[in-house]
Image (tube, rainbow, N blue to C red):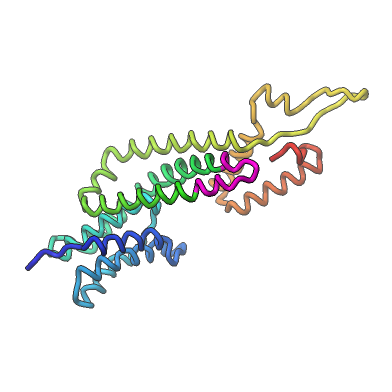
Amino acid sequence: MARKEVSKKALTKSFWNWFYGNLTCFSQEHMQTFGYLVSMLPIVDELYDDKEEKQKAMETYTAFFNTEPQIGTVVVGITAGLEEARANGEQIDSEMINGIRAGLMGPLAGIGDSLIVGTLIPILLGIGLGLSGGGSPLGAIFYIIVWNILAISGMRLLYFKGYELGGKAVEVIVGEKATAIRESVIMVGTIVIGAVAATWINITTSFKLSNAEGGTIIDLQKTFDGIFPKLLSAITVIFCWWLMKKKKMSPTTVMLILVVIAFVGVLLGFFNPGLTY
């Protein structure tokens, strides 16, 4: 019996299904499960002829799945390779495939969130904001083009590399080197976030104490600058992080809180709307 192999056409269709549909029917209960199902349909459809075999194979991918979509593309590629091996009678079952998926999705989420969400996207947005001065559309055009080029090429590379490696990729991703890689990426991401915050957030106070003759006794902003430049900006960033991380507030709620603080601050004379942005 000839060995079954997934065609380049089916692999390409599987990749694009994941690229466009990884968040299909996204919910707190299922997360990326249905996006994963959609991406595996071309693989299963080509490997199996019997309807019951197809159904049984697809049931494997109804298990919960959630990771960082870009870096997580490699998992889809790996399972495409594993599914091909299973269709050829190798000792691979649903439990093994789901065990690999479950073992990979956490570490890859940590790497992806730090590398993509915490590092690459802020860098691209920072460049885009710099190009958008005076209302120029160049910033938006830059981000859209560069992000899509990097995302498509990077995800495609990971998908096909995962397919080629199959189960061998697991040791590389979750082995001893994985911890060092994650820690390094997290450190870089933290530095980038700090740089973006320092560059684009500028909160100042207009509060001053004056004497009877109208002379300034205390200029609070100059005092802050002498102690810790951009102190109010740093406090704001830490405050927002605390609300979202520790108090589990949504970004929308945090923004509303900032609006209230800014409004009250302007009424009390602590903030000047012309100087706070």
> Total marks drawn?
0
x 21%, y 58%: residue? 82
Task: Please say whether residue 8 is visible from this viewpoint.
Answer: yes
Name the one closer to the observer, 2 or 60: 2
Q: Is residue 1 above or below residue 78?
A: below
Residue that lies at the very extreme toward the right in this rendered image: 213
In this image, 98 relative to 5: left or right?
A: right
The image position of residue 171, as x and y in percent, is: 23, 45
Residue that lies at the very extreme toward the left in this rendered image: 1
Main SS of the magenta part reads helix
Indicate the quadrant where residue 139 lies. top right
User: Magenta segment: does it hold 134?
Assistant: yes
User: Magenta segment: does it hold 195?
Assistant: no
- Where is the N terminus found, in terms of image quarters? bottom left
x 23%, y 64%: residue? 94
Indicate the quadrant where residue 230 lies. top right
- Where is the C terminus found, in terms of image quarters? top right
The image position of residue 212, as x and y in percent, is: 92, 24
Indicate the quadrant where residue 5 lies. bottom left
In this image, 223 relative to 169: left or right?
A: right
The image position of residue 145, as x and y in percent, is: 46, 49
Q: Is residue 59 above or below residue 273?
A: below
Task: Please say whether residue 106 is visible from this viewpoint.
Answer: no
Magenta residues, start to end: 129-143
Name the one closer to the observer, 29 or 55: 55
x 92%, y 23%: residue? 213
Residue that lies at the very extreme toward the bottom in this rendered image: 51
x 24%, y 61%: residue? 95
